[in-house]
Amino acid sequence: MYGSILVLDFGSQYTQLIARRIRELQVYSLIKPYNISISEIKKINPKGIILSGGPASVYEKQAPFCDRKVFQLGIPILGICYGLQTIVHILEGKVKKSVRQEYGRALMYIDDHHDLFFTLPAAINVWMSHADYTVKLPPGFVSMAHTRNAEYAAVASRDKKIWGVQFHPEVIHTEFGTQIISNFLFRICGCFANWELSSFVDEAISKIRKQVRDKKVIGGLSGGVDSSTLALLLQKAIGRRFKGIFVNNGLLRKGEASYVVKVFRRSFKIDLKYIDARREFLRELRDITDPEEKRKIIGHKFIEVFEKEAKKVKGVEFLAQGTLYPDVIESISFSGAPSVRIKSHHNVGGLPLNMKLKLVEPFRELFKDEVRKVAKILGLPDALVYRHPFPGPGLGVRIVGEITPRRLRILREADAIIEKVIKKEGIYRKIWQAFAVLLPLKSVGVMGDRRTYEYVIALRAVESQDGMTADWVKLSPQVLAEISARIINEVEGVNRVVYDISSKPPSTIEWE
């Protein structure tokens, strides 16, 4: 059995990213709540423990703390940001509110190159995100690094096997962040790089069979990589007892419905039921403009339709969903820690309390790029493996404001043009996600010597590894010009195209 690293979640938006970085280094990681019991930790028997960051301050009344006995287990511990402050506070150091808060890049000077910072340069750029800082170290701790505003940017007590950093090594903005995590895993914890996604596939199939037993499972097929991979995994696990259902909610991309039916019925021979629910969804969404309300309506309607179909199939007790880590972390705290909800996802935040189907979610602890690797292992064609991510609520969250048939038509046509152009230019697979957004405003234009007053389309193209952080793509002027010209000339109702040049954070990838 491979050794594991246990990540204790204090509510950070980056908690899942920590786990992902560990898995990239082929070490198994798992996430548990910050208040996990000592007995459960002993059952897991991890090689190391990482305390995540979080939005709280240790001096607040309701601040979350792990059991003090965690520090007496003799297991190597690394605290990140709030995790460091937790270590300092519990072990009788002192943390206070910073006069000069640090957010973003900061130059950190390394004073101790042993273990955690082995082979690193004397100074590196790190990603800070904190309003508190350590002013007094606990007994037995020494400083390892400092910044202009933080005397104790990294600390250690090697006798206690405890290390802590004020910055975030898990984000790509920190130089040598992967090396720092690697040093903790291999030099300090003694881990071996022996975990692979092929192991995940075998375990997932085993877990599905154990959970489902002799019952049937219904799964939603959308044509995206998540649902496609999920369908193949379920088929491998339980064969014909997996029943696919494709719900056309009226919020799909151009040609999506016919494409999905063709691929799964003809190519994969999956038992697929097609449900045309376009009118039902659009009726429910009429006059709705709030993005959270739209997401919840779509989620509730989706499950309602599913339950209706499930009753027609004897022996169905489970609903398979392709819920991913980013879906979970942006909707609710994975662990119950006090994280801040960014937006609800239709896979997790919009499920009605009285849903009668039990959930099968084998990808709940995977990121999008990891699902793609699983898809390759299962033999999914590249055309599906490398499709750009598409949100569960579909075009409903790419129309800012009210959803109408006319606005859907405009957005579909514009989105299809963007996909055609970037595929023609050979850059489709180099981009994480590219799509159109229909804005709730109109602008004046001149077309054919006539004044027009039509909609504005925003073009969004980002590069990312996992969807947790993203930067906008520097598309060439020629590509931007072609996309703009084609949309304005070919899509009736649009006379202006703008390009979104914001990154995540602070923006999200989707507009709603």
Image (tube, rainbow, N blue to C red):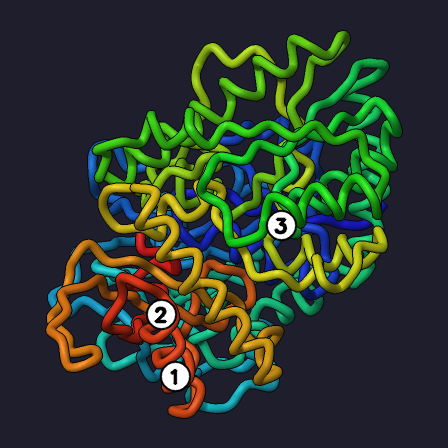
Q: Which residue is mark 1?
A: 480
Q: Residue at x 45, y 35 (%)?
A: 346
Q: Earlier in the sequence, mark 3 or mark 2?
A: 3
Q: Quadrant of residue 363?
A: top right
Q: Decide: marks 3, 2 in contact (CB < 8 A)?
A: no
What amino acid type is highlighted by mark number 1? Leu
Q: Quadrant of residue 362?
A: top right
Horizontally, residue 18 falls left or right of residue 438, namely: right
Q: Earlier in the sequence, mark 1 or mark 2?
A: 2
Horizontally, residue 184 falls left or right of residue 452, namely: right
Mark 2 burial class by Cα count in 10 Å: few <14, some 14-19, many 20+: many
Mark 3 burial class by Cα count in 10 Å: few <14, some 14-19, many 20+: many
Rendering coords of residue 212 (x, y %): 78, 19
Q: Decide: marks 1, 2 in contact (CB < 8 A)?
A: yes
What amino acid type is highlighted by mark number 2? Leu
What amino acid type is highlighted by mark number 3? Gly
- For the N terminus, which image quadrant? top right
Q: CA distance from mark 1 to mark 2?
A: 9 Å
Question: Where 372 falls versus 150 (above or below)?
Answer: above
Q: Which residue is mark 3?
A: 224
Q: Residue at x 31, y 31 (%)?
A: 285
Q: Quadrant of residue 158?
A: bottom right
